Image (cartoon, rainbow, N blue to C red):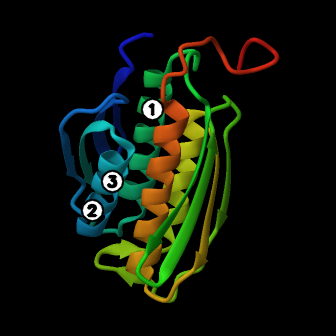
Amino acid sequence: MSQRTAQVTRTSKETDITAFVSLDGGPVKVETGIGFFDHMLTALAVHGGFGLSLHAEGDLYVDCHHTIEDTGIVLGKAFGQALGDKGGICRFGSFFIPMDEALAFASVDISGRPYLVFQGEFPEERVGDFDTCMAEEFFRAFAVNSGMTLHLRVEYGKNSHHMIEALFKAAAHALRLAVAPNNGGVLSTKGML
């Protein structure tokens, strides 16, 4: 297996973001300027068993949209690069996470075919400085730019913080299973992804 790490920098007129990812663990440090989003990305890394160093500067005077979506782009590209040819991994992972009254489910196929199915409606419009509608936008950018099929569903819940955090943690554990080494080649009847 290769080193399973990658660093990606993306600079636009709206954001300047650098992410380093190690699929096999390491320190976690996240700075986006959006407290709840930092909390979610930290949970994604810790529960996924990933090393993550991410620094984002964005036009937060506009709103959180560009920073969150562009972070999804950069993080997705980093994951995609760290996965290389996607050989030698388990490829699939699914996980349920309960968080108090909320329950969330995630299922991932590291397939090279980007797709997001997102089912979740949140009772509050914001959690801190994080617009709850941005959960879907983040995961869409992440799935498309990493080349994975990702299905996410909030089964139920009443507190938007709990519901979104359960989603991020479910995604983390599903990813942890999918990127785990299987000591084989590419897991596909085609012999490639």
Closer to the chain start, of discs 3 and 1, is 3
Residue 162 location, x and y as percent?
Answer: 40, 77
Q: Residue at x 59, y 28 (%)?
A: 90
* Mark 3, secondary structure of its residue: helix
- The disc placed on residue 39 is 2
Location of the C terminus by quadrant is top right
Do the residues under discs 3 and 1 have CB atoms within 8 angstroms? no
Query: Which is more toward the observer, 79 or 94?
Result: 94
**Dot 2 or dot 1, earlier in sequence:** 2
Q: How far apart are labels 2 and 3 at the CA level?
A: 6 Å
Q: Amino acid at mark 3?
A: Leu
The number of numbered discs placed on residues in the rendered structure image is 3
Q: Position of residue 85 (x, y in %)?
A: 57, 15
Q: State if disc 3 and disc 2 touch (CB < 8 Å).
A: yes
Badge 1 amino acid: Phe
Q: Residue 192 sits in which quadrant? A: top right
- Relative height, residue 180 to residue 187 (above, below): below
Position of 85 with respect to 117 (left or right) is: left
Residue closest to the far right: 189
Residue 14 seen in render: no
Q: Are marks 2 and 1 in contact (CB under 8 Å)?
A: no
**Quarter-of-image position of residue 129:** bottom left
Q: CA distance from mark 2 to mark 1?
A: 19 Å
Instruction: Using the image, determine if residue 100 lies above or below residue 40.
Output: below
What residue sits 27% from the left and 38% below the top? 52
Residue 26 screen position, x and y as percent: 22, 33
Using the image, tell me which numbered label, if any, was put on residue 161. Answer: none
Q: Is residue 9 left or right of residue 92?
A: left
Q: Would you name the residue on which mark 3 appears?
A: 41
Q: Mark 1 = which residue?
A: 79
Q: Residues within 10 Å of mark 3 (few under 14, many from 20)?
A: many
Q: Quadrant of residue 21?
A: top left
